[in-house]
Every structure is written in structure tokens, then in C-alpha cells.
Amino acid sequence: MNYLKLSKEISYILRHNPSQYSLELDDLGYVEIEKLLNALNATRHYPKEITLEDLFKVIELSDKKRLEISSNTIRALYGHSIKEQIIKSPATPPLVLYHGTSHNALEKIIVEGLKPMQRQYVHLSIDIETAIQVGKRRDASPILLSIDTKKAIENGINFYLGNDKVWLSDAIPVKYIQVIEK
Ligand code: HQG
């Protein structure tokens, strides 16, 4: 079984396009596992039937905690772009969070702040190493930003838990962002 391909297809479904697979997410982003498996198997993208064990394997082999199972349902923990907003409860993040980005994006970010862009929330990293990994998807030598979450929260900006490494947030105005000089 190609678990990387399966992982990408599941993330695509649960983050971006459940309706293409005739699925609907609930307000928290969950879908019934059985429905997801049926939808995946209906695609005939895989040489053999996808089972619950395959889902467990995807989660076990993943380099990041992207998916969450809760009883008979599953959801993506972050990354959503569907138009129905996934409901997240505001939570208290570490005092500082990080964001790795490209030189290109920086020009805009220092003027208009961090925006969710194609996704529902801004994605922030819990440590510099994670932020560098995220930034390297777009720039071999990424720019590192730090976010003063305490000041941002005091001014009404909400943060939400993604996974053990990723926090989500509303748009972050420039005044809470600093460029970390390397
Ligand atoms: C940038 C991956 C111009 C932002 C990662 C980023 C992450 C702006 C890009 C997760 C901007 C959006 C999310 C502004 C922000 N003007 N550009 N005002 N504000 N940007 O992919 O944070 O492997 O939507 O800096 O590891 O890069 O898929 O967000 O470069 O956790 O599980 O616009 O996706 O996880 O890009 O990455 P993205 P991201 P997975």
C-alpha cells in the first residue's frame, strides 16, 4: 500500500474538498470513518480495499500529526481551506510562536501582517526548528518570524490548538511580529 499517497488524498479530502467525494464534515471537521473509507474505495485509486488498519498505518507512519480519530470519526487537525469555517476553541499558546516563510512573502507580511491566505487560519509553529521546516517548503533559506502571542491575545486575537507542533490563529497584525535575524 502506498501510504504516502493515501495520506495526501485523505488530507486533501478532509482539508480541502470533501464534497468531491460526496462527504460532508461536521462543524469540528469530523467525518465518519466508515464514510471516508467507502469514499476512498469508490475512487478505485488503490489496488486493494482501504481498511481501518490502513488508516491507522497512515497515522502511525506520518511525519506530522495531521489527523485525529475520535470514536468512529476522523478529522484533519489543521490546514483547512473549505468555505465552511471549522470551529476551533480559543486556547492559550506559548508566549512566543514562530512562522517560517519565504523572502517573497515577507515583503507583504511586513506591510499587512500574517494572513490565512488560502486556508481558514494562520499556521504558526511551536519552535524554530518546525518553523524552518515549514518555511523550507517555499524558500531554501526561509525567513523566520516570531509572534508575541501575549500582546496579540490582549488585543483580541485568538489562537487555537492544531497539534503538538502547530498552532492556528486569526490574522496577525504587523505590530506583534518580529523578524528573527539569523
Ligand atoms: C504566507 C504544512 C503574502 C505564509 C506546514 C505562507 C504548515 C503571506 C503562505 C501548514 C501573507 C501560506 C501551513 C501575506 C502569510 N502576504 N504571503 N500577508 N501572510 N503569507 O501553506 O503556514 O505538511 O497556507 O507565510 O507544515 O506555510 O500540509 O501556510 O508562506 O503546518 O501538514 O502565505 O501546512 O503542513 O502558505 O503552512 P500555507 P504555511 P502539512
Image: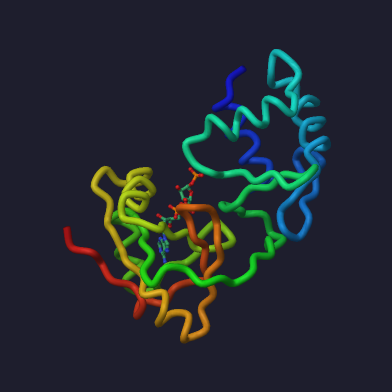
State whether residue 16 appears in this view.
no
Percent across and percent down for residue 51 are 75, 24
Nearest the viewer among 82 and 145 is: 145
Q: Name the residue rendered at 79%, 32% in the picture.
A: 39
Residue 131 left/right relative to 11: left
Q: Name the residue rendered at 49%, 41% in the picture.
A: 64
In the rendered image, the vertical position of residue 104 relative to residue 16, given as above or below: below
| In the image, farthest residue toward the bottom | 155
Nearest the viewer among 82 and 157 is: 157
Residue 167 left/right relative to 113: right
In the rendered image, the vertical position of residue 129 relative to residue 60, given as above or below: below
Percent across and percent down for residue 81 are 61, 54
The N terminus sits in image quarter: top right
Q: Name the residue rendered at 78%, 25% in the picture.
A: 41
Q: Quadrant of ligand 1?
A: bottom left
Residue 101 left/right relative to 69: left
The C terminus sits in image quarter: bottom left
